[in-house]
Image (cartoon, rainbow, N blue to C red):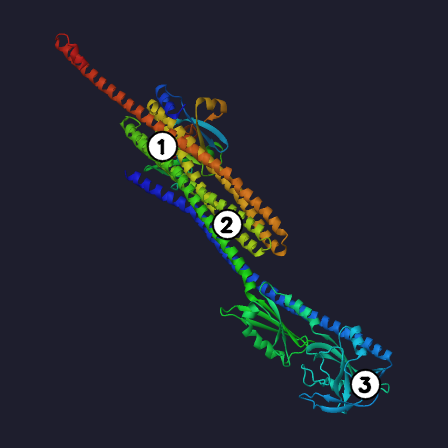
Amino acid sequence: MSVAEEVASATSAGRRKQYLLFAVGDIRCYVELTRLNSVVPWATLLPAEEDAVIGWLNYRGNRVPVIDMAKQVLGEETSRTLGSRILLLECSGRQVGALVSEAFAIGTEEDIATSGMERLDPCEVLTSAIARLP
Amino acid sequence: MLGATAMKFSKRSLRKKILLLSLMPAIAVTIVLAFIIWNSSRRASTIVRTNVTDFMVIRTQKSLHHGYASAEVTANYIDRELRLNMNIAQLILAATGGVSLQGPSATRELIGDEQHVGGQTSLQPIRFGSDLLNRGRSDIVQEVAQQTGGLAIVFQRVGKTGDLVRVAASSPAVRLNTFLGKTTQDASVNPAEIISSGNSYVGRTLEAGEWHIGRYEPLRDTKGEIIGALYLGQSVTGVTSLQRELAANSIGTHGSVAIIYAHGPQRGQMLVKPFDIAEETESQWLPVVMSKSLNMKDAQEEALDVPSKDGNDAAIVRFSYIQKYDWILVAIADAKELRQASVAVKSEFSRLQWTMLIAGLITLGTVGALSWLMSRRVVDPLLGITIQLTSSGTQIASSASQQLNAATSFNVSSTEVATAVKEISSTSQELLRAMEELSQEAARASEIAREGSTVLAGFGASIELLERAGQTISSSLTAIREKAGKINAVTAAVTKVADQTNLLSLNAAIEAEKAGEAGAGFGVVAREIRRLADQSARASQEIEQTIREMQDAVGAGGDEVRALTDAVEKSTEVSELVRAQFSEIIARVEAMTPRYEMVHLGMQNQSEGAQQISEAMWQLTETASQTTDAVAELNQVSLELHHAVNILKQRIFEGADETTPETLQG
């Protein structure tokens, strides 16, 4: 099927739910795409005084706190590489950045079922850290 | 419009660059080879000239030595024969009963000359046993001449001074009653004096009107007193065969030999006349030879180079003195002959140079045409894709902006996609250019290696040429290494762009997901962009791998070439080995071509992906406009419905009649 046909069929026959597959340290996990606002590459952050955040990201004029997922889940810092990504999402009405090691693919429900990955909603992990934010 | 003009410009400049990059190495190779050949021809002609000059000088000297040796052998032979004949003559004389002066004196009319006074003199006749010699003819003398095969003369001593007068001879050509004169060769030597003092004399004298080489031996009577002399001689006609042999002794095609008398009245007379170049330059060498000949000793050798008008040597002259015959033996060689060899070498080289130039021009033409075609094939499709993508992107953006919810984010995303695609396209162009450069360098290296190999085959001994070829290959390999480094930088850029594109596709997917039903098509597009980004990343990794392998091969090749260039200086045998190594390098460089094709295939896949995306974009635009229309229609319908319900309400409250259906339909 050509891409054009595929686009046509996708429009008429509805669509499947899609997930972002990402990694925190060595752990591979997924989250619904609808949960996310955006994915941005690692950028230089404004320094933060709070312990909970590793810095402030200037995202389209807004100051967004960035929290290291690996530090929250595994207790160790994410090593920052070219593949490091910041997932931007809204947790209890507040825009938050979650630093992950890699965002490697977009997957369907079938992909998730066969891979045996865990669902990991950053908001759930970051609840305590967000609570400590000013 | 503006974008299209910029594209056109960059397309033209890209084509020019591709053409330039292809042609530059070909021109450089042609120029370098032409220089190498020119330089080699200069050196070769110098070497040939020096060697041929040395050879000709040695040849001339050898010719002279050979001539002198022949003359000496001949002289020794004649000398020995004369001595042998003299012994035979003495035995014949002894057999007659010895020599004595007997009988009554008779008056003889002696013929005077410059040194002797003639006139009537009374002499007692010489007798050999019973044979009296007063008649001038003698049986004994005849017999002696017959036995020895030459000329025999008997001299009688006259007066106290020791002058010798011819009294009998075997040939009637001998004038009797004449004095034995001084030799023509050396005025200080008086043969008569030598003989009278009891010694024999050997030399060249004029007897019977002919030049003879002969031996004079004192004749002693029974008491041991010298009463005369016996002469035995060989005509110099015996020596003419020697002359003939020397004359036949030519040097080269135009060189020849001359024999000239050195002393006496015959001084300057040529016994053997030279020809060709020797004759042409006679006025230049003859006076020098003659003036030097006065003080020359036997076998002494002299050299003389005759210059010509154009500054080069016209003739090489070597001469020597042969005392036995009073000859100056002159060997003259034509210097032009030796110049011909170097001229031949030079013309051969210039032929080679022209062939090379024509081959270079053909190569230039072929390379130019090929790279023009390639530039067309590479640039046009790429340009088409980019323009289509841009316009599609803009269309999508405008259509998406009409949609109610996802309008803003759609617009932003599709502009970013267009930018990313443009970036990929420009990076791909840069990559293609670099690949082109690299393959040109590789072709150049292989070409030079091939040339080197051919040159090796032709000039197995010309180690210097090989060294130069080795250096050129070495520098070419260095250039390849540098180019490979540049490609690595480009692939790093491609990797970075691919990474950014991947990120973009993730965000596009998120936006599509959020747009719900309307964004489904855009989700597919996002996935295709992601796939394209992955392909780019893989392709760049493959290129990196290929470049690393090639760098290794080139490094190994460079080391081998350097090592072999050193080794070849020590031994010409190594040249065979070098040729083998060359073919290995050629094979290695040529082995790279399939890899380039693989990469090219990858890039084609990429461009197909881009084409598919463009189609998808077009489809999406249509779908989006349909959706917009549907939404607008829905809006309109709902508005009217609302309006109708309002009217209905009004009528009910007013208690009016039924509402007409026309109002509802609007």
Horizontal side of residue B79 vs A49, given as left or right: right
Q: Is residue B255 left or right of residue B106?
A: left
Q: Residues within 10 Å of mark 3 (few under 14, many from 20)?
A: many
Q: Residues within 10 Å of mark 1 (few under 14, many from 20)?
A: some
Distance between mark 1 and mark 3 Cα atoms = 161 Å
| Identity, as a three-letter code, of the amino acid under mark 2 | Ser
User: Is residue A118 in view?
Assistant: yes
Amino acid of disc 3: Ile
Callout 2: 10 Å neighbours few (<14), some, many (20+)?
many
Residue B311 as seen in the image, left or right of residue B1: right
Instruction: Identify the mark at residue A95; answer none if there is no mark.
Output: 1
Q: Which residue is mark 2?
A: B476
**B199 lies left or right of B358:** right
Q: Quadrant of residue B132?
A: bottom right
Q: Marks 1 and 3: which is nearer the front?
A: 3
Q: Which one is in front in this view, the residue at disc 2 or the one at disc 1?
A: 2
Residue sitting nearer the eye, B659 or B101? B101
Residue at figure coordinates x 62%, y 65% from the top left: B250
Which disc is residue B190 wearing? none
Mark 1 belongs to which subunit? A
- Report the front residue among B479 and B440: B440
Q: Is residue B600 above or below residue B353?
A: above
SS label for mark 1: strand
Location of the C terminus of chain B by quadrant is top left
- Pick the residue in front: B89 or B317: B89
Residue named by callout 3 = B126
Q: CA distance from mark 3 to mark 2?
A: 103 Å
Q: Secondary structure at mark 3?
A: strand
Quarter-wise, where is residue B335 in the image? Answer: bottom right
Residue B357, compared with residue B61, is above or below; it is above
Figure quadrant of the N terminus of chain B: top left
The chain containing the residue under callout 3 comes to: B
